[in-house]
Amino acid sequence: MRFEDVRIGDAETPIEFQFSLTSLVRYAAATWDFHPYHYDTEFVRRFGMPAPVADGQMLGALMARMMMSWGGDDAYLRRLGYRQRQPVFAGETVVFEGRVVSKSAQSGAGLVDAVLTARKTDGTVVISDAAATIELASAALSQQDIRGAS
């Protein structure tokens, strides 16, 4: 996707992810976070949780994946900020969505700002008002840079 193709109000392609116990264990292994609350059902039930809980960073990684999939191979994630409002447990499915709220050109880069949300399939809001900025290629901005350099 190119910067010129983006319109304010455009929606990113949502992703739906089922947080299986296997996915939690794989993420824990990838991030070296082996706390039992990410994989041990008996352990978490002692603390009143129904199932192991997803690492909050995993939610951020999925939002980053959504933005990068939407932006394409040449996109660059400049910024991602979020606050998790609810835990996500093994067995739950979350839908990640985003919407373009602004775009700008800075130092020859085409920047697109989006607001992101994550909701469980029962409607529970997990993340609201997350913010992301991606940089997209732009033929027009590239030409301006070339002209400005001469």
Image (cartoon, helix red, strand yellow):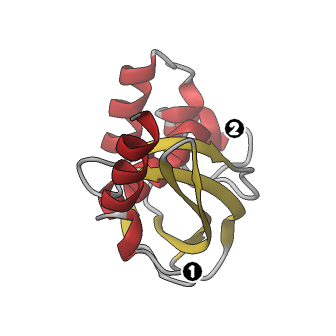
Q: Is residue 130 visible?
A: yes
Residue placed at 35% from the left, 49% from the top?
142
Horizontal side of residue 100 vs 148, given as left or right: right
| Residue 71 sits in quarter | bottom left
Q: Any mark on residue 46, and which?
A: 2
Say above or below: 35 vs 111: above
Residue bearing the label numbered 1: 8
Residue placed at 57% from the left, 80% from the top?
8
Say above or below: 9 vs 148: below
Q: Is residue 19 visible?
A: no
Q: Amino acid at mark 2?
A: Arg
Q: Amino acid at mark 1?
A: Ile
Whole-angstrom CA distance, mark 1 to mark 2, is 47 Å
Q: Secondary structure at mark 2?
A: loop
Extreme residue toward the front, this view: 150
Chain-order first, disc 1 or disc 2 = 1
Q: Nearer the viewer, residue 53 or 133?
A: 133
Q: Nearer the viewer, residue 46 or 111?
A: 111
